[in-house]
Amino acid sequence: MKQSIVMALVGVLMFAATGLAQDPVDYAGAAPKHWHEIDNDFMRAFKNPMEGLEMGLDLRLREVYTRNMLTVSDSMEGDKHFQRIRPRWSTKWTLDDDITFSTRLTWEFWNHCYPRGGAGAFFGQRSTDFDEAIFDHMNIQFRNAFDLPLTLTVGRQDIILGTGWLVLDGTPADGSRTIFFDAVRGTYQLTDTAKLDMIYIQQYDDESKWLKPFNHSAVRDRRHLTQNQDEKGVILYLTNNVTDDFGFDAYYMFKKDKKSGWANYWTNKTGTNRRGDDQETNVLGGRVFGNLDTNWSYSAEAAYQFGRFRPDGGDFVDQRAFGTNNKLQYSFHDKLNNEVHIGYEYMS
């Protein structure tokens, strides 16, 4: 039945975007220059140190003041003050006209200024935690694969589909340090306006399953990528920008979760359920978006979810759900690109 649904949806998506383009569109072109990007001889030499190699470096500084972050008890936690410092170094190697190899090394370390209470050793002492460094990008990309308007990206990569409502963060348990997926992504340019993304994802809770981070031994007991489960997924995602003022997305997603080895070990050892899901989920959905005039724009998305899950190791039970996410935005088109919007989200 599941195979029939997938094949039927593929047929609908292909029909919705008939007329193959003769020349592929570079849908993943270079990002526009940021307003505070530094441009001088040193930076140009750093960015292009040799033929066929591009490098990048960015730094995120985050100051955090919080009260009762993990509980609602003053006696257990109280106030906390810390910094999160995250430098990232990226490389892009051009191996051929249509083949590139990309990496990005991410290192986020924490400086604890004001701990109080005993909510765990990580927050319970005043110190600098140098943590670990992890490759959150490591992939090879083939453009015009098999002499088709097809781009294949194989390996660790960021994937954001549509507004990011359903597909954005592949590593929710590491606290916004990374968002990567370990995946194979094929993007087929159907027409000048339409493309079909075909994605397979294999995500492990254990950070060291694919690429072991540097200094991982210092944090392996508390670092996880997912919510204590191993995940497999398949996504078919059609995007069609029909005109400059109207477009739509249509998609099918399947996701299978299995409680990770870490969660099983500690559940059996302590007798306490360490979360993690045993679950199979299907999602059918779509989105329409566009411009009402030069200032007003909109996005309206809805999705239906069905499948089954096994609570606390018991028998599988069926589940059904519906959700919608919508936004109406006004753009001022001033020097600062100010925008205001109103949104509505519903999840059953």
Image: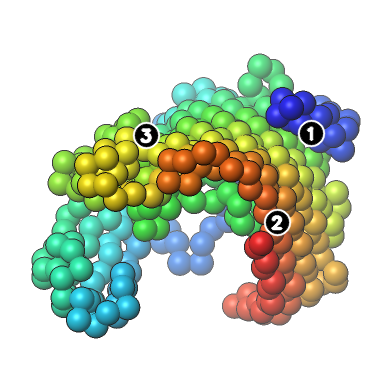
State the residue in front, 197 or 5. Answer: 5
Q: Which residue is mark 1?
A: 9
Q: From where the camera sits, is residue 89 visible?
A: no
Q: Residues within 10 Å of mark 1 (few under 14, many from 20)?
A: some
> Label for residue 50?
3
- The answer to whether any part of residue 71 appears in the image is yes
Q: Which residue is found at the position 67% from the left and 45% from the top?
A: 306
Q: Is residue 226 left or right of residue 79?
A: right
The percent coordinates of residue 281 (x first, y second) are 61, 41
Name the residue that disc number 2 marks: 322
Residue at screen point 24% across, 83% down: 74
Gap between marks 2 and 1 measured at Cα? 19 Å
SS label for mark 3: loop
Q: Tell us which disc is closer to us: 2 or 3.
A: 2
Quadrant hosting residue 328: bottom right
- Quarter placement of the C terminus: bottom right
Total numbered labels placed on residues in the image: 3
